[in-house]
Image (tube, helix red, strand yellow):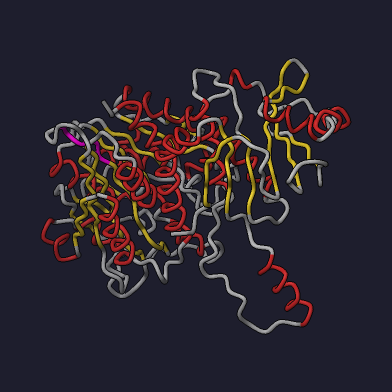
Amino acid sequence: MSQQLDVEFVSLSDDLEPTAVVIGAEAKDALALSDTADAFNSKSSNAISRAARAADFTGKAKSWIELLAPSKLKCQRLIVVGAGPADNAKTTDWVLLGGAIAGRVTARKTKSASVVADVVETGGKKAEDIAADLALGLQLRCYSFEKYKTDAGPKSKKESGNAKDSKTAKALERIVIHCDNPKKTAKAYEDRRAIANGVTLARDLVNEPANTLGPVEFANIAKDLEKSGLEVEILDDEALEELGMGALLSVGLGSAKPSRVAVMQWNGAKSKRTKPIAFVGKGVVFDTGGISIKPAAGMEGMKGDMGGAACVTGLMRTLAERKANVNAVGLIGLVENMPDGKATRPGDIVTSMSKQTIEVLNTDAEGRLVLADVLWYTQQRFKPKLVIDLATLTGAIMIALGKDFAGLFANDDRLASNLLDASKKTDEKLWRMPLDASFDKMIKGSTGDIKNLGGRWGGACTAAAFIKRFIDDTPWAHIDLAGTAMDASSTDINRSWGSGWGVRLLDRFVADHHEK
């Protein structure tokens, strides 16, 4: 996993790192500074106030001013970042502010920085929770995937000099957060660190190239999460064939890499008899489209067609590391979709684990075949109280919603409402889409029970209708995150191609609605 930012919590003081950040709130067109920031202001001859007036800085959210070499302070840079009207700030606002702070700090090269989180308890939130939320935002923004970057290769003298400079000017490595109660804040940050670990894992998985992350390697990473306290079982291709997962196995027939299903369990509820909640992820580690091959342009991005499985894996790590009071199971179907003499052809009919037969009209509509079998297996084995699947399933959802929203389909209004509530709290945006009988008609098969393509119109909706055929009477939600899991819009807390989208959303959903 990518190396994370070292976060340390200390008492309020003026013993600052070379770069320091203080937070100012917006108050009736004036800048309101904390007591600590006011002390810095006085010590440096009211430099903050004078700079604020000169720049018309009033503490508006994410606005900033920068003072270089402020007199009588031990830092080389002092950045004042606006928090906006702090009385109305929500958890996600503080997390996003932490990301914005990281953006300002890293605008210049520095190895370490101080953030003075001398914040007033406001909006029903304790000061230690606000400081911990800031730290989470800082952590998420500072993620980078540089595993394969080297200084190897021939260089000109000029390039050699630049390379040397880049080695000495390393990226931000350490954040020192000055706060009123370091012990309480560090305790509050434990759960946030578990969230950061889960998001980082999900990002790493999506960013990893497919030549190093096949189904077996992905399954091994899931197995390694036993170190975090999960129970993990790996089903190999022989086990999958014995279970009758003909739909899932048909996707991987053209690949030299065998298919896998990873089953991750976390039993954290007080009663082990409590029914689990289930999460299922599509894990197509690379999708060429199979015989219905995709255009070459942009195909390299199909290493991210396992964003749903990455999210489920990251979520299960988070639940285990923060010892969530819930029973949860995460299952991921891991396959590679390649063209080959053994590959499934358009027109083939495959038999799913549910015994429903599927006409494969297009081998590039493969993710729904994977989900069909894993969802059926999940319900048959675990009898969950609800199941949520996540998949980078359709380009159609991006046509409908763009790249800031994931599509939500659900057969249960309460489940949908709870997910939308978690979406608002985390700013991982969902938009509910229709499930209607008209879409069922569009996937009715002519030579098999159903077909894997519903035609040109409503592609995301017909895909959801297909998946619904493999749901019994269990409350179910399907999240199509094709636009948000990879190459998504940049945010204050994400600059990565692989976003780790969904981990924070689902963790919030679990915490608010399924932990007692």
Q: Would you place residue 433 above or below residue 160 in this image?
A: above
Residue at screen point 51% across, 67% down: 147
Question: In x, y percent, where is residue 138?
Answer: 57, 43
Where is residue 56, by image quadrant?
top right
Residue at screen point 72% across, 18% down: 27
Q: Is residue 368 left or right of residue 155?
A: left
Q: Would you place residue 251 above or below residue 256 in this image?
A: above
Quadrant location of the C terminus in the rendered image = top left
Q: Would you place residue 335 above or below residue 276 in this image?
A: below
Between 3 and 48, the residue placed more toward the observer is: 48
Quadrant location of the N terminus in the rendered image = bottom left
> Which segment is the magenta one?
274-278
Q: Is residue 36 visible?
A: yes
Where is residue 87, by image quadrant?
top right
On whether residue 365 falls in the magenta region, the answer is no
| The furthest residue to the top | 28
Where is residue 347, by image quadrant?
bottom left
Q: Main secondary structure of the magenta part?
A: loop
Between 136 and 284, the residue placed more toward the observer is: 136
Q: Is residue 18 left or right of residue 241?
A: right
Q: So how many labels did they put on this image?
A: 0
Q: Is residue 83 left or right of residue 298?
A: right
Between 132 and 429, the residue placed more toward the observer is: 132
Q: Is residue 459 visible?
A: no
Residue at screen point 43% across, 44% down: 193
Q: Would you place residue 200 above or below residue 513 in this image?
A: below
Question: In x, y percent, where is residue 334?
Answer: 30, 59
Residue at screen point 42% across, 42% down: 195
Question: In x, y percent, where is residue 226?
Answer: 25, 55
| The furthest residue to the right | 54
Question: In x, y percent, where is residue 306?
Answer: 39, 55
